């Protein structure tokens, strides 16, 4: 777990992020689930289907409850913390069955709707509006992990970057609801891969489901790319700077945006065993203009937990197809570049421009004829010293003209001994950061 000084507390969250980045006008919109749902739907983002809105007593009394589907969800528009939500799991003749097994009839449903209208579950206990929406069908990937209810994925989005994610699993104690304070399990998720990494339940770290031998880490969340896209699109559409987006996976319809929270809770830090404040600081000054870039930034900065575990097991570092390297020049000057990992090439090659910048073009030891798509050419060979992370590499490398290419250096398989290569591990973020740096080049 990160140091306590890096953890985001409630006061800091409210002052530095919510008050500063979430204007009251926009918070009022997000606090209304119906307004939020309407805006998201208007912008082409998927949400659960709305069945009925109850604004007054007449709406409750005149509605034909026989037209309700066998399963549905009743919610207060201004509810918080999961309060007032009634999840109907199925129907038996004239009775409906709730997700905790309790049976209710039409009178029970009407009474619950009256409580919502009276403001029993609203922020400030003000009169509220109730609505009924489609019940999400649990995705088969989660059937063995959730007790009766539907799991959801909470993603914190800041500055159009998904900075932290958590899978919330309903338990018997939470009565099938995915709320941590009601007893649900929080499971941290690796941003880059969508694979679960840590479990948190009743203020303790867990590795298995309660009363089970089923591990909760290593679960791959389906449609992860789409889930990340929806979370960032949601922030872009709503205009708030700091939000929590709750997404569910429907068996038939895929990812749906369930709710948006302008004041997301802080338990996600325990689930990830990492400090949210530190992650927020890392993206605060970045200029992220597109959804795609925001996702790339999030993956690069806050992914890699799975790669780290592989490294711990194998003892071999994991690199992607692009990797930052530090080259030592003739005058011992060091400079960072982004290199392409190319297992199709035997020898490492650096651009003539790099060689000239570092004085390495004066240290040619021999030349060798090579054949490429451009035909035969004679390339200089130099002694080259560079490092990938903590590993130092001493090799003989080609000098070639790569000015017109995206990367000015390729690392051949001769110099990749001891590394594991993950093609899905990208470094698009590094390119963005390098553009604003004087001591790095692509």
Image: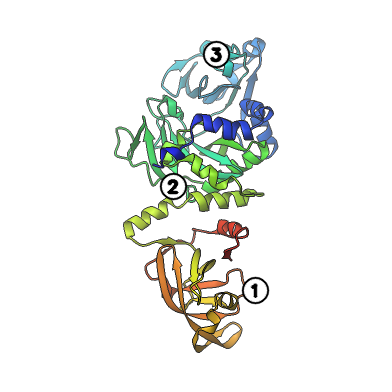
Residue 200 placed where, x, y %?
38, 35
Residue at 52% x, 72% y: name it.
Answer: 410
Few, some or many residues within 10 Å of mark 3 (<14, 14–19, 20+): some
The quadrant the N terminus occupies is top left
Mark found first going from the N terminus, 3 or 1:
3
Helix, strand or loop under label 1: loop
Q: Is residue 337 left or right of residue 288?
A: left
- Rendered view: 316 above or below 74: below
Mark found first going from the N terminus, 2 or 3:
3
Question: Between 318 and 135, which is closer to the camera in this rendering?
Answer: 318
Say whether residue 5 is visible: yes
CA distance separating discs 3 and 1: 66 Å
Identify the disc placed on residue 404. 1
The quadrant the C terminus occupies is bottom right
Residue 437 placed where, x, y %?
60, 60
Identify the disc placed on residue 195. 2
Residue 441 placed where, x, y %?
58, 66
- Label 1 near label 2: C-beta < 8 Å? no
- Rendered view: 127 above or below 393: above
**Pointer 3 residue:** 120
From the image, state whether disc 2 or disc 1 is nearer to you: 1
Residue 358 placed where, x, y %?
55, 75
Residue at 54% x, 47% y: name it.
Answer: 282
Helix, strand or loop under label 2: loop
Residue at 58% x, 16% y: name it.
Answer: 124
From the image, state whether disc 3 or disc 1 is nearer to you: 1
Question: Between 1 and 346, which is closer to the camera in this rendering?
Answer: 1
Mark found first going from the N terminus, 2 or 1:
2
């Amino acid at each position: 777990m990160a140091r306590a000084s890096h953890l985001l507390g409630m006061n800091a969250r409210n002052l530095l992020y919510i008050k500063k980045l979430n204007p009251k006008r926009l918070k009022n919109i997000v606090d209304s689930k119906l307004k939020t749902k309407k805006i998201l739907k208007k912008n082409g983002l998927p949400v659960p289907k709305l069945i009925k809105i109850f604004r007054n007593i007449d709406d409750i009394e005149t509605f034909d409850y026989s037209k309700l589907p066998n399963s549905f969800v009743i919610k207060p528009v201004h509810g918080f913390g999961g309060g007032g939500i009634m999840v109907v799991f199925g129907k038996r003749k004239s009775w409906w069955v709730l997700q905790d097994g309790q049976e209710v009839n039409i009178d029970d449903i009407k009474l619950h709707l009256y409580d919502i209208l009276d403001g029993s579950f609203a922020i400030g206990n003000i009169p509220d509006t109730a609505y009924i929406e489609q019940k999400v069908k649990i995705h088969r990937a989660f059937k063995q992990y959730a007790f009766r209810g539907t799991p959801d994925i909470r993603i914190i989005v800041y500055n159009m970057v998904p900075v932290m994610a958590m899978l919330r699993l309903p338990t018997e104690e939470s009565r099938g609801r995915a709320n941590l304070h009601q007893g649900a399990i929080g499971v941290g998720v690796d941003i880059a891969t969508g694979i679960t990494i840590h479990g948190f339940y009743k203020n303790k770290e867990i590795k298995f489901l309660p009363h089970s031998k089923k591990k909760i880490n290593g679960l791959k969340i389906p449609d992860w790319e789409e889930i990340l896209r929806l979370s960032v699109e949601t922030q872009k559409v709503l205009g708030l700077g700091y939000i929590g987006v709750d997404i569910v996976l429907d068996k038939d319809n895929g990812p749906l945006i369930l709710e948006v929270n302008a004041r997301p809770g802080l338990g996600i830090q325990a689930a990830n065993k990492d400090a949210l404040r530190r992650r927020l600081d890392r993206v605060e000054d970045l200029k992220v203009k597109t959804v795609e870039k925001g996702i790339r930034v999030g993956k690069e900065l806050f992914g890699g937990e799975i790669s780290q575990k592989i490294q711990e097991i194998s003892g071999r570092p994991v690199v992607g197809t692009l990797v930052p390297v530090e080259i030592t020049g003739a005058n011992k000057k060091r400079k960072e570049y982004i290199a392409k990992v190319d297992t199709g090439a035997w020898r490492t090659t650096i651009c003539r421009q790099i060689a000239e910048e570092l004085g390495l073009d004066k240290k040619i030891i021999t030349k060798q004829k090579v054949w490429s798509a451009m035909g035969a050419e004679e390339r200089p060979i130099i002694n080259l010293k560079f490092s990938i992370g903590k590993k130092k590499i001493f090799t003989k490398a080609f000098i070639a003209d790569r000015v017109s290419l995206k990367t000015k250096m390729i690392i051949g398989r001769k110099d990749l001994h001891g590394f594991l290569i993950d093609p899905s591990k990208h470094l698009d973020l590094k390119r963005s950061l390098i553009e604003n740096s004087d001591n790095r080049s692509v």
